[in-house]
Image: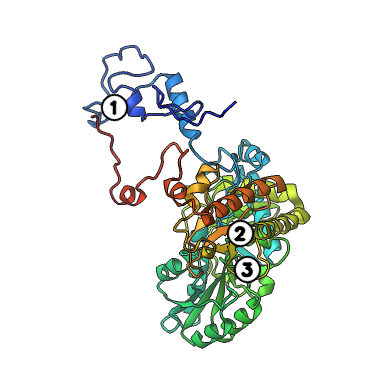
Amino acid sequence: MTANTQHHPTFTGNKALQIEEALSFEIGGLDRTGVDFPPAEDRADRLGGLGRDSDIGLPGLSEPETMRHFVRLSQKNYAIDMGPFPLGSCTMKHNPRLNEKIARLPGFADLHPLAPQSCVQGALELIDTLADWLKQLTGMPAVAMSPKAGAHGELCGMMAIKAAIEARGEGAKRTRVLAPESAHGTNPATAVQCGFTVEAIPADATGRVDLAALKEKLGDDVAAIMVTNPNTCGLFERDIRAIADAVHDAGGYFYCDGANFNAIAGKVKPGDLGVDAMHINLHKTFSTPHGGGGPGAGPTVLAASLAEFAPVPFVERRDGDYHLVETPGAKSFGRLTAFHGQMGMFTRALAYMMSHGIDGVRQVAEDAVLNANYVLARLKVEMTPAFDGYCMHEALFDDRFLKDTGVEIAKAMIDEGYHPMTMYFPLVVHGAMLIEPTESESKRELDLFCGALLSLAKRAKAGATEAFKAAPVYAPRRRLDETAAARKPVLRWTPA
């Protein structure tokens, strides 16, 4: 039999199980509802004159219509439960369902932030236990648990550094923060938010911090350096101790961006590397769901040099009970957030740690690095690695293999059923393609993913330019004008 390659439009717009779905406003009616209520009794309202005097303007749908609408929309999303999420610099790993079960336990899921401390002893013990795990894994004596995201954790660390500098009477003098050119964008933004100016440090030929250039920029006006390790090129900073020593000798502090802690957890303790402060993305390293602006949690570990500047609240055990300390000490920079933090993230992260154990956490890091190097080895026969040698948790390629082809492969990856990897970041590499497979993926999944990329690379080199420019062909929506959508968003539906 000959395969039917003709594509005919369907009456419904559906393509087999790929269901075309309209807006809920287009499906439902503004003049009806999916629920019948008896007429309301005539009685005075208690709304103080704030009752609605016009129609609410929301569409009415039946229960089947509502359920089908959102299920169909969900099927248009790519998710970690569907396949690999190869975003470099953003660890997207499998979220064990055990974590979700624990997070939903009564006593954790239904906590109120203003509940009396005597009623939440178990929750406080959980926070304290998780804090101890984080201190053990990092080799740091203190941790602030209240930051609610990675960038929030950065802010916590930099505010502690600022408080320490001001306590030394050097607040007016130490105004510069150094950051590598490959730093996450939140690093310089956080430093500026704290009132510092930022200077970039170039990378050397190996993709790591140029130590000589760093030392030239050091002076008695430097407050801190912000370094990601392993860095955004997927490489371990081999000079990390020399960097820390040089900054400390100049009177500054060493802030480490912990976004890539998944590569070294259980293997290397940042405290042994000279780090003064580091945030940890619980939603990355310890497998809790993230994306779309939340949920997240970014506890910040602090060395002895900064411990007394930590924010409140924090958990303390006295006389066999757990207490939430709300009053800041003499040197604490105060309160970072209204309440303690993300209980759902804490329960998930601790469940992950305890189910793995320290040896399991170490194997997670080892397998993440192994998978990334396997991807690097498989793909470098057709694609061009940005740097020589082995990588850590993510493999970085550049676009030299696409030279003179006139194409890019990200949109074509969508047709192959994959979310594209991180493109054009870090900026220190032209045409960067950053792939982080994490430890979650099996060899079979990685082989299929690598096979798809190798096929695309070969087709691009063979001159299939028009096919690449047309991609994605099979997506429910094709080449959207994302720039116009961002600049001129249509946020209100109006009937035709």
Note whether residue 358 is visible. yes
Q: Amino acid at mark 2?
A: Glu
Residue pushed farthest right? 359
Q: Residues within 10 Å of mark 1 (few under 14, many from 20)?
A: few
Please give the name of the residue rendered at 37% of the width and 29% of the height, measured from the top-left corner: 22
- Compare marks 3 and 1 and give the one earlier in the sequence: 1
Please give the name of the residue rendered at 53% of the width and 84% of the height, measured from the top-left corner: 213
* Whether residue 458 is situated above or below residue 480 in the rendered picture: below
Note whether residue 291 is visible. no
Identify the residue position indicated by label 3 in the image.
Answer: 235
Q: Are marks 1 and 2 in contact (CB under 8 Å)?
A: no
Q: Locate residue 137 relative to residue 186 in the image: left or right.
A: right
Numbered tag placed on residue 46 in the rendering? 1
Identify the residue position indicated by label 2 in the image.
Answer: 382
| In front of the other: 209 or 168 | 209
Numbered tag placed on residue 302 in the rendering? none
